[in-house]
Amino acid sequence: MKTNKIIYYAATGLLTLLMLFSISMYIFKHDEIEIAFTNFGYPTYIIYPYAIAKLLGLIALWLPGFKTLKEWAYSGFFFAFILAFFAHFMIGDGEHMAALIALILLILSYIFYKKNN
């Protein structure tokens, strides 16, 4: 039981750090992110709402209780990471590994969240 909690908190903590880095890039390096979104063919007006959605998802992952909200956050991150992986892979910018690492951390976090509850 103790090992499960350690793995859960380690995976969720590393995922949180990765997502906070991503959110900070969206906010503080907006010009660079605009170029990346343009290369993907995405509209740039979704950058700030996407950063807010990521932050709200992180809050949902760390809040005790709110099991349904937590499930939605896991689901949202799952689809976001898969789509990010393929978006980066298709344009060949080499950033697809960060999305893959995030996906692995998310899956570990989810599995051990379920084992702990």
Image (tube, rainbow, N blue to C red):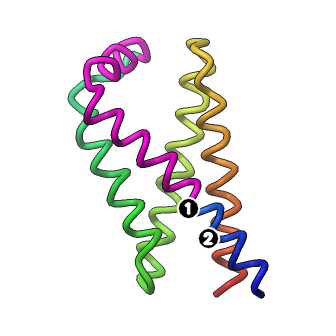
To which residue does mark 2 refer? 9
Q: Main secondary structure of the magenta part?
A: helix
Q: Residue at x 55, y 42 (%)?
A: 81
Picture quarter containing residue 2? bottom right
* Residues tagged 2 and 1 counted as in contact (Cβ below 8 A): yes
Picture quarter containing residue 87? top right
Above-or-below relation of 33 to 76? above
Residues in magenta?
13-40
Query: Is-magenta flag for residue 16?
Result: yes
Residue 72, given in percent of the width and then of the height, sits at 46, 65
Residue 97, given in percent of the width and then of the height, sits at 66, 31
Above-or-below relation of 38 to 75? above
Residue flagged by tag 2: what amino acid is it? Tyr
Find residue 13 and name its label: 1
Q: Residue at x 35, y 33 (%)?
A: 25
> Tag 1, which secondary structure?
helix
